[in-house]
Image: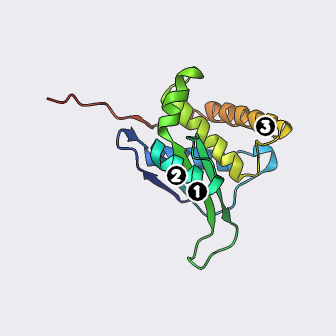
Amino acid sequence: MRVVRTNNLVPDFDAAPDSIAHLFALLDEWTAGGRRIFPGELSVAFLDDAAMCRLHADFLGDPSPTDVISFPGEPEDDGTGEPFAGELCVCVAQAQREAGKHGNTLAEEVLLYLVHGWLHLAGYDDIEDADRQAMRAAESAALSYLREAGFVPGWASKPQTAKA
């Protein structure tokens, strides 16, 4: 079973680490068109707009908000005793903005971003049109697989408390 580390930097988002780990266990069982991600630990970070914009600027030269950034891991042990599968950084604010546009709940939009990131780690790309079409087909297949497996995201916005 893969170790999944969750780092939630968004105070009003309940990341539900057990649900995240279950999602990736299911995706690791799925064939993904014969593609897999490296074995080992997977890191998932939930970020706000400011943090995601900094990350996007630092690593991709674009300071605008984005949905998910994937950092591939290393297939070999780096001396820590465990290979590293990679890291997914998800912007919760972007998911909140986009969910309604796509007819999704926040949980569904975040699920799409996590699947999309996992597919990047599995070798899918979405730069060229043909690659983007293959990515969309893989996303659809993965989401169908997850529905058939009965997966329900456990993450959501935390209820807002009234201020006196």
> Which amino acid lies under the numbered mark 3 shown in the image of this protein?
Arg
- Give the residue pinned by disc 1: 58
**Quadrant where the N terminus lies?**
bottom right
Question: Where in the figure is residue 81, as x and y percent of width and height?
Answer: 57, 76
Q: Which of pointers 1 and 3 indicates the residue nearer the eye?
A: 1
Q: CA distance from mark 3 to mark 2?
A: 25 Å
> Residue at the spot x=35%, y=43% of the render?
11
> Residue at the spot x=62%, y=45% of the render?
26
Question: Where in the figure is residue 144, as x and y percent of width and height?
Answer: 68, 31
State the mark number for residue 54. 2
Q: Secondary structure at mark 1?
A: helix
Q: Secondary structure at mark 2?
A: helix
Compared with 35, 149 (above or below) is above
Residues at marks 3 and 2 touching, judged by CB atoms closer than 8 Å: no
- Give the residue pinned by disc 3: 132
> Residue at the spot x=63%, y=35% of the render?
146
Q: CA distance from mark 1 to mark 2?
A: 6 Å
Residues at marks 1 and 2 touching, judged by CB atoms closer than 8 Å: yes
Residue at the farthest left position: 164
Q: CA distance from mark 1 to mark 3?
A: 24 Å
